[in-house]
Structures are given as structure tokens and as C-alpha cells.
Image (cartoon, rainbow, N blue to C red):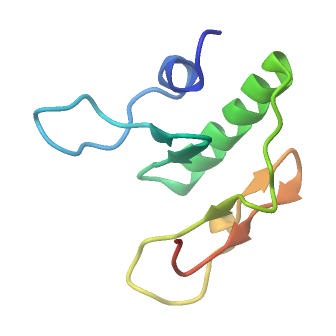
Amino acid sequence: MNDIVTHLKRHCGSGVFISNQFEEVQALMCADGIATVAKKAWKLQTQINRIYEFCKFTGMQLNLDKSKFMVFRSGGPLRHYERKFYNERPIEIVPFYR
């Protein structure tokens, strides 16, 4: 495994379409952070599981205190399948992120 984005592309399949100028996007990286994106709730959990595997393999650690996720949809209560977990630990759901 050489980098986390390559790992996600290899194991999670297609990403989210942004424009014809770019490949489908699975993740965005900056400095010491990564933001993953998915169209379906189950696909996001698959990405989170693959990030866990990558971190375990490389010796990296994910800071769950700084890890958040957002659900984009037209309202209503959060559905049970929209909750996400990292190594069986729940990830905090937020309405916005800074």
C-alpha cells in the first residue's frame, strides 16, 4: 500500500462525480487530514473500514476526537444505517464542519 487514496480507489471502487475534468473522487487530502466522500451510506462505512485497515497496516493512527462526518439529505431524523463506526467506535455526526 503506497497511499491512502490509492488504497481507497483500489478497494472501494468508484467515487463521487464532480466534473468531466476530474476522475471520480473518493477522498480529498490536505496537510494532515483527509475527507472521504460517498454517495451511499454503506459505501462510506466501507471507506472507513478500509482507512482503518490502512492505518493498522502502516502504523498510523486516526484521531477520533477530530474525526467527524456529515449526512447531506433533505432532513428528517438520522437513520440507523447513517451512523458510522471506526473499529467499532462511533464517529461523531455534525451538522457542519469548520
Where in the figure is residue 42, as x and y percent of width and height? 59, 49
Q: Which residue occupies the extreme top position in the image? A: 1
Residue 95 vertical position relative to residue 67 in the rendered view, above or below: below
Residue 87 vertical position relative to residue 98 in the rendered view, above or below: above
Q: Quadrant of residue 20?
A: top left
Total numbered labels placed on residues in the image: 0
Q: Residue at x 49, y 41 (%)?
A: 30
Q: Residue at x 70, y 58 (%)?
A: 67
Residue 79 vertical position relative to residue 61 in the rendered view, above or below: below
> Depth check: 14 or 21 in front?
21
Where in the figure is residue 77, as x and y percent of width and height? 59, 88
Q: Quadrant of the N terminus?
A: top right
> Depth check: 16 or 78 in front?
16
Q: Residue at x 51, y 78 (%)?
A: 96
Q: Which residue occupies the extreme front position in the image? A: 31
Q: Quadrant of residue 33?
A: top right
Q: Residue at x 50, y 18 (%)?
A: 6
The answer to whether 53 appears left or right of 24 in the picture is right
> Depth check: 32 or 51 in front?
32
Where in the figure is residue 36, as x and y percent of width and height? 52, 46
The answer to whether 53 appears left or right of 51 in the picture is right
> Depth check: 94 or 11 in front?
94
Where in the figure is residue 78, as x and y percent of width and height? 61, 80
Q: Which residue occupies the extreme bottom position in the image? A: 76
